[in-house]
Image (cartoon, grey):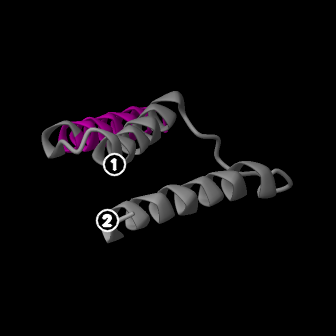
């Protein structure tokens, strides 16, 4: 494994640990639930990370990151209108 693959693998592991901590440790506190759009944006980020290591195409990865950012902005605007 070259250094970039090790970095990507560590990033995926860290994101998975954060995911576990957010969903299983904070059950006792009243926390805001993850909206479907936020979960979709998180999925696009994960797909971008995975596609970087598998496909090795920056265009696809950056496109997935851009989709995640746009979905996150839409989610923020929708939640702002609700409140």
Q: Which residue is mark 2?
A: 4
Q: Residue at x 52, y 28 (%)?
A: 36
Q: Residue at x 26, y 35 (%)?
A: 67
Q: Residue at x 47, y 59 (%)?
A: 9
- Comparing 34 with 82, the one in front is 34
Q: Residue at x 78, y 51 (%)?
A: 24
Q: To which quarter of the image does residue 25 belong?
A: bottom right
Looking at the image, residue 28 sits to the left or right of residue 52; the answer is right
Q: To which quarter of the image does residue 5 belong?
A: bottom left
Q: Which residue is mark 1?
A: 53
Residue 79 disc label: none
Answer above or below: position of 60 versus 26: above
x, y percent for residue 2: 33, 66
Q: Residue furthest front?
A: 1
Answer above or below: position of 28 versus 1: above
Q: Quadrant of the N terminus?
A: bottom left
Q: Residue furthest bottom?
A: 3
The kind of secondary structure element at disc 2 is: helix
Q: Residue furthest left?
A: 59
**Residue count near mark 1 (Cα–Cα under 10 Å), binned few <14, some 14–19, many ≥20:** some
Looking at the image, residue 15 sits to the left or right of residue 53; the answer is right
User: Would you say residue 64 sits in the magenta stretch?
Assistant: yes
- Of labels 2 and 1, earlier in sequence is 2
Over which residues does the magenta segment extend?
61-83
Q: Are marks 2 and 1 in contact (CB under 8 Å)?
A: no
User: Would you say residue 13 sits in the magenta stretch?
Assistant: no
């Amino acid at each position: 494994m070259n250094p970039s693959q090790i970095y990507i693998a560590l990033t995926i592991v860290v994101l998975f640990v954060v995911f576990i901590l957010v969903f299983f440790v904070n059950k006792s506190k009243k926390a805001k639930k993850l909206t479907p759009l936020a979960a979709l944006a998180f999925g696009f980020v994960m797909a971008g990370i995975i596609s970087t290591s598998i496909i090795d195409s920056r265009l696809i990865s950056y496109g997935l990151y851009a989709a995640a950012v746009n979905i996150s902005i839409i989610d923020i605007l929708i939640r702002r209108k609700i409140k």
